Amino acid sequence: MKSLDDIAAALQGYDPNALSVNQVHAFLAELVQPVSADESQDAFLFAALGRVLAQDVVSPISVPAHNNSAMDGFAFDAAQLHTDQPLMLRVVGTALAGKAWQGKVNAGECLKIMTGAILPDNLDTVVPQEFCQVVASHDVTTITIPPNILKAGDNRRLMGEDLMQGQAALQAGQHLTPAALGLVASLGLPDVRVHRRLRVAYFSTGDEVLSLGEAPREGAVFDSNRYTVFGMLTRMGCEVMDMGVVRDDPVLLEAAFAKAALEADAIITSGGVSVGEADFTKAMMKKLGDVAFWKIAMRPGRPMAVGRIGKSVLFGLPGNPVAVMVTFLAFVRPALLRMMGSTAQPAPLLRAKSLEPLRKKAGRTEYQRGFVSSAADGTLHVRTTGNQGSGVLSSMVQGNGLIVLHHAQGNVAVGDEVDVMMFEGAI
């Protein structure tokens, strides 16, 4: 396990008082490691949504298991097709989904077939029933297929075209989405091997922070950060340890950090990491762990602490509500996903035209709350939510994404394209 000094020494241009967003990502990529696969567990499909696979899901069968019809129609041997004249065939039976048709189809004959029904070995093409003329006379039914509407293999699903037996259907590190659950079920598998849930302890710090239910007092604020962090962690599928509000008392802080480090894979705090704050949080982090304190070239969310206390990875976030959410989305969430064993790549940033001028200083990354909408021609537009103060939590509700103004970027004019990080699924 690398120390923080070792990681910093390998990071070009590392300066804890002026870190770029990209340098923070590079540092965290070295700091955090996936949980051990030895602690993986089996999960039934109904309980597996959102979990991370600990091993590949290997298909025990081919999907589909047989060549079958992709639609209702008539199955026949396409070798009989002629490009310049219609083809007349006699219907000799009906094949239903769920069982093989017992019989033989000779030249000049066809088989009425339902969607999903097994194709007999000597038949390779299905004509949709609406594409041909059907004539029933006494005990004989014939169809006539017009020329030039089909080619060999049309409307046929091949055995194993989705998955072949022995092929990896899903790979370790993938998240089990609703579609993935359906895929696993289609293989006849009732459960999957997943990483255990990541255990994350969280608490707010500061004498000025009120828990819900406490009486208001001058200069104090109700703690919103516990609830936003709880929501974001829960959406990620973490096992959350809510440790409440810890006062600026060395004994209480030491007890909280010690308990969290004993029980959790990661510790998240809010408050107490800014320069000159009159509390004991930074001192206790230094005393108990290997911790670095950063000033990141970003807005909002400049101060941040990272490191280890015991076996736990520590993320010390700012105290302002928006700064907490922005630093969580930008840094903590990707790091926790890595710890969960996830191989998911970050969602791509969208490009949208700004509906207003944006002031921006080069030399830092800014995350402005924005609302993305679609224009009549399908292009994406974005506007800010207004006041961008780091305490304006309502802007995180009014917006549907963050306008990401990159480190070297300057002012933005109306109509300029900007990158947007969308909120959906994250907060």
Image (cartoon, grey):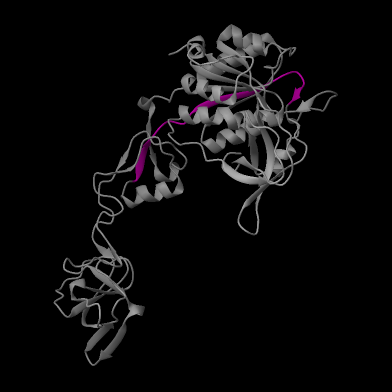
Q: Main secondary structure of the magenta part?
A: strand
Q: Residue 93: say if magenta.
A: no
The vertical placement of 97 against 231, above or below, is below
Query: Residue 203 lies in magenta, yes or no?
Result: yes
Along the line of sight, the residue nearer the viewer: 9 or 423: 9
Q: Which range is magenta?
A: 190-210
Q: Nearer the viewer, residue 126 or 217?
A: 126
Which image quarter is the N terminus in?
A: top left
Q: Position of residue 368 (x, y in %)?
A: 69, 36
- Residue extending farthest to the right is 218
Closest to the observer: 241 or 114?
114
Number of numbered discs visible in the structure rendering: 0
* Relative to 108, residue 183 above or below: above
Q: Position of residue 216 (x, y in %)?
A: 82, 28
Taking the spot 30% from the left edge, 65% from the top edge, the residue there is 116
Q: Which quadrant does the C terminus fall into?
A: top right
- Outermost top residue: 287
Residue at image location 69% in from the left, 31% down from the top: 322
Q: Is residue 363 left or right of residue 9?
A: right
Task: State whether residue 77 appears in this view.
Answer: no
Residue 99 in the image, given as x and y percentages of width and height = 24, 66
Residue positioned 73% across, 39% down in the render? 395
Q: Position of residue 295 (x, y in %)?
A: 65, 18
Determine whether, in the image, residue 258 is placed left or right of residue 113: right
Residue at screen point 43% across, 42% down = 176
